[in-house]
Image (cartoon, rainbow, N blue to C red):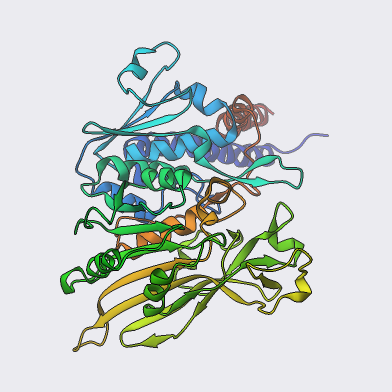
Amino acid sequence: MRYGKGKFGKQGLFVFTVSAAFLILFLLNLCVTALAREYPFLSFDLTKSGLFALSPQTTENIRALRKPVTIFVLARESDFAKVSSYNAQANEIIKQYEKNSGSISLVYVDYVKDPAFAASYPGVIMKHGDILVSCEGNYTLVKTEELFNYAVSAGGSLSILSSKAEEAVYTAILKVSSDKQIEAVVSAGHGEYTMGDFSELLRKNNYRISARNLVTGDIDPSTDIVLIIAPKSDFSEGELEKLDRYLANGGKYGKTILYCADAEQPPLEALSVFLREWGVLAGDGAVFETDENRVYNYHPFYAVADYAEDNYSELLRGMAKPMLMPVSRPLETIFEYRNNYSTKVLLSFAASAGVRPSGASADFTADDAVRRGPIPALVLCAYSLADRRTGKTAAASYLLVSGSAGMLDGYSVNNPSFSNGEYLVNLLNSLTNRTDVIAFQPKSFTGSPLNLPRAKVNALGLACIALVPLLLLAAGLAVWIRRRRA
């Protein structure tokens, strides 16, 4: 059976047109890709969570950066990216910093072949794959594992949940390039609780930490925050007067004190009077939890607390993770507002919680508890002055009171199952009026096909953008030639 020449010509022309369209799209893709390398604003991230793009606020902030910043990735790019699909995503995010700021340079260091690099940064313990950020003699290290958020399974194993590469690198840039660090003074001389892990967390977030015994010295007016962590002996009247002067700040206010109580503290009468003036009472005993789903490591006194308000909890990337408040004293607010003083409960233990008095007998049970939840766990006290014209707050100082010093321990602030580290740093940043801090959203890997080896990804990409169009073009030409000869 023989078809007419015209019919074959129409079919061939159709196939040829489709094939030519694919070829044009292929060439256009090459041109756009080349332009995107030179002009990053031409790049588009179509993933749901913006896996490969910086947030608009990050982009705006780094474009305003004037100091020269260098990001050193301690590996060859190919080695760093091929470790896993997660590293590949982090690598793309890191590259966006250089593309979006003329002040940021990105350098991949062959760390194995260049051991002299580490010698240039004494005191920094670095390893292959880490990231070092440097600016005008200041530098800080971001470990590879700090680029991700983790989930803990019931068996205790860790798995990568989402990426925080953008946040980790931005925080490092902020730390080395900022003109002003937050000055934090830790009270000493009263047997205060040590908080090494939390201090390290603050240092990573551009806080300068120093200790001060208020008996022998005043608080420097440049201090932004004073931390008083579970003292074992009472403060003198003179020390409390220094705290009052610090918070008043010559009538300018704008200062913050973080006070953490502990269930094992002895009675501290003078400090109790000081807290009462601000509207909060640290009660006797320790909070326990009767709901096994609200405790850590099956310990009833290692209870979690709920977010009791929205303003500060919104600083978190998500409220799915709870706050751990171990061995906490029960707090109580005396008033909500009085004579320019106000109180706000930020964290609260659930209705299933109770209080075990300090003098309870050995046979004490949960049913014997007199006080039950909800019980305040973290209270923000404020002394504020309002602008007479607008009625808005013109100046304020804050006393942040926690019933738990254990909320600052390593198992609390470094545990990926809890929000302690993130929440407390964001809260203190807000109270100290840091304007260069960004509340980042995690870049979730859920539903993203990032589990293919790089070789397969490259092969698949090549097939999609080059091989398929070329095969179609070849087929179209063959059909067109055959039909024309027919």
Q: Quadrant of residue 424?
A: bottom left
The extreme top residue here reads: 113
For the question of whether residue 56 can be seen, the reply is yes
Q: Position of residue 112 (x, y in %)?
A: 45, 13
179 relative to 31 in the view: left or right: left
Q: Position of residue 55 (x, y in %)?
A: 41, 53
Residue at 23% x, 46% y is 65
Q: Quadrant of residue 48?
A: bottom right
Q: Position of residue 115 (x, y in %)?
A: 39, 13
Above or below residue 114? Residue 95 is below
Q: Quadrant of residue 380?
A: bottom left
Residue at 65% x, 32% y is 452
Q: Nearer the viewer, residue 187 or 302?
A: 187
Q: Nearer the viewer, residue 348 or 37?
A: 348
Residue at 33% x, 50% y is 59
For the question of whether residue 439 can be seen, the reply is no
143 relative to 64 in the view: left or right: right
Q: Nearer the viewer, residue 253 or 164?
A: 253
Q: How many marks?
A: 0
Q: Position of residue 371 (x, y in %)?
A: 66, 78
The extreme left residue here reads: 250
Above or below residue 398? Residue 132 is above
448 relative to 136 in the view: left or right: right
Quadrant into which the C terminus falls = top right
Quadrant into which the N terminus falls = top right
Above or below residue 237? Residue 185 is above
